[in-house]
Amino acid sequence: MPKLNVNIDHVATIRQARGGVEPDPVAAAVLAELAGADGIVVHLREDRRHIQDRDLRLLRETVKTKLNMEMAATEEMVQIAKAVLPDMVTLVPEKRKELTTEGGLDVKGNYKNVSRTVRELKTSGLFVSLFIDPDHEQIKISKEAGAQMVELHTGNYSDAANEEEMETELDKIESAVHAAVKAGLRVAAGHGLDYTNTQYVAQFEDIEELNIGHSIVSRAVLVGMEKAVSDMLILCS
Ligand code: PXP
């Protein structure tokens, strides 16, 4: 049964829509933890479109489970991660114009920068995961780059247009999980997971953690964070 880490970026998205102080992602994290979430995930983007530096600092002080900071492999973010010291860091690709993270990190194409960033973060005692597509070559290179974990991108699976496509994508995830474990990597997964598709990914024993944001925050707006998290925990069990 994988652990459930709740990504609260979109609580901050609502706050930023008015540039005010509510809803506060720090409060959302408390409620998610009270409902049983195993961890909290935030992506501090270069353009600060949702999570702010202040959120990350306060979450470091208040999160009692595990704080996972998603970030681009840039010098600015490395310095912030080294100062804040989250429980883990996930390196993700980042483009200014994208609506959300599109595709996994191309570790092969950016090997020098990624491996240097992993090394610098690990030197500060940080645990490092790389968000990659469920692709055997990227898995192999992630290990070479020094990653301790990979988070497999479930976006293609979540976007599948029909059952057949879904099965095909699920097979790719399963094969990637095996390859990652064989390579000595710990495994997480996430992106686009919701209340209809999470249970099939949660069945893979070697996936230790699922990172889920948009669907939980969307449901939380209607029924409350605690109910939204506990509904998702049922699908992970
Ligand atoms: N994992 C990573 C690396 C992400 O960038 C995101 C989106 O911020 C998620 C998981 C969660 O995706 P979603 O919001 O679609 O659940």
Image (spheres, rainbow, N blue to C red):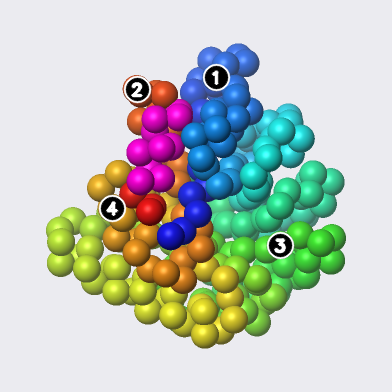
Residue 46, position as x, y percentages in the image: 65, 43
Q: Residue 222 carries which label?
A: 2
Q: In which quarter of the image is the N terminus?
A: bottom left
The residue indicated by pointer 3 is 127
Name the one closer to the observer, 121 or 177.
177
Q: Which amino acid does label 4 sit on?
A: Asn
Q: What residue type is labelled 2?
A: Leu
Q: Is mark 2 on a helix, strand or loop?
A: helix
Do the numbered discs 2 and 3 sit on residues whose CB atoms are within 8 Å? no
- Mark 1 packing: few (<14 Cα in 10 Å), some, or many (20+)? some
Q: What residue type is labelled 1?
A: Pro
Name the one closer to the observer, 176 or 2.
2
Region rendered in magenta: 225-234
Q: Which mark is residue 23?
A: 1
The residue indicated by pointer 4 is 197
Who's the residue at 37% across and 79% down the image?
A: 175
SS majority, magenta: helix
- Mark 2 packing: few (<14 Cα in 10 Å), some, or many (20+)? few
Do the numbered discs 3 and 4 sit on residues whose CB atoms are within 8 Å? no
- Compute the Cα span from label 4 to label 1: 28 Å
Q: Which of marks 1 and 3 is nearer the N terminus?
A: 1
Q: In which quarter of the image is the C terminus?
A: bottom left
Q: Earlier in the sequence, mark 3 or mark 4?
A: 3
Q: Eyeballing the image, is 224 above or below 34?
A: above
Residue 203, position as x, y percentages in the image: 34, 64
Residue 76, position as x, y percentages in the image: 77, 49
